[in-house]
Image (tube, rainbow, N blue to C red):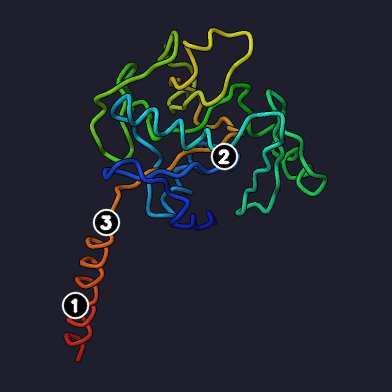
Amino acid sequence: MASRIAEDQFRREGASFISSYVNSPSIWAEAKAGCRANGAELASIHSDRENECIYKSIADCPASKAKCALCSPQRGERVLFGVDESPKLEKTSWFYLVKNEDKRPQSKYHTIWLGGRRRKGMQSSFEWIDSTPFNYTNWAKDEPGKRTKDQDCMSFYNRRINGWDESSYLKHWNVISCHQMLWYGYVCKKPFVTPAKAKARRKILRRRRRRNRKGKH
């Protein structure tokens, strides 16, 4: 079961939405479930500003000389990353991940999951799973490519890729297999609710509960 994300982990982005970067190796379906368990959806992006905000949510975890210790609460495993290194796993976690290597192809790219996917039966049409309009794009070089196998899910290049044209990839999107295991996790997003609106909603819910209780007597 996906763990709850503490409310203060969600980052405010103006007054429209808040996002949280979850450092948990996952396939796309697991990432979607992880967000929904916290009342959010995998992130949709609608402007250059939102794209930059998503990147900043990710960049808070430094990819410097110091190791960045990441924890996956739902699996109880700890993963250590360095700059452009393969994950180094503690002994207690190693066997779990090796067991799944054959079943879960791992992405060699520095990418994280977004909430976009190819429309069913469509070659070049995409949608956001939060039902917002697909009205902005920031594709990486040569993306989105022609569909092969199950390459239907969108991800975001979140780190520098040595030897590549960085400007064509960093902060841009690509389409990969939904069953790829992305080591760098995913970003959740949900509407920002002011304290006043949250309080008003709680009042409405209390009134509904009272009416329901009265209706049962």
Quarter of the image where the C terminus is located = bottom left
Q: Nearer the viewer, residue 136 or 37?
A: 136
**Quadrant of residue 25 within the rendered picture:** top right
Mark pair 1, 2: CA separation: 40 Å
Tell me: 81 left or right of 94. left
Counting residues from the start of the chain, the first of labels 3 and 1 encountered is 3
Circle 3 residues within 10 Å: few <14, some 14–19, many ≥20: few
**Quadrant of residue 45 within the rendered picture:** top left
157 versus 141 height, above or below: below
Circle 2 residues within 10 Å: few <14, some 14–19, many ≥20: many
For badge 1, the amino acid type reads Arg
Circle 1 residues within 10 Å: few <14, some 14–19, many ≥20: few
Position in image of residue 144 (x %, y %):
40, 15
Tell me: 86 left or right of 173. right
For the residue labelled by badge 3, is the local secondary structure a helix, a strand or a loop?
A: loop
Q: Which residue is mark 2?
A: 26
212 versus 87 height, above or below: below
Q: Which residue is mark 1?
A: 207
For badge 2, the amino acid type reads Ser
129 versus 162 height, above or below: below
For the residue labelled by badge 2, is the local secondary structure a helix, a strand or a loop?
A: loop
Mark pair 3, 2: CA separation: 31 Å
Q: Residue at x 71, y 34 (%)?
A: 66
Q: Nearer the viewer, residue 174 or 178?
A: 174
**Quadrant of residue 138 within the rendered picture:** top left
Circle 3/circle 2 CB separation < 8 Å:
no
Q: Which residue is mark 3?
A: 194
Q: Residue at x 62, y 48 (%)?
A: 72
Q: Residue at x 68, y 43 (%)?
A: 69
Q: Nearer the viewer, mark 1 or mark 2?
A: 1
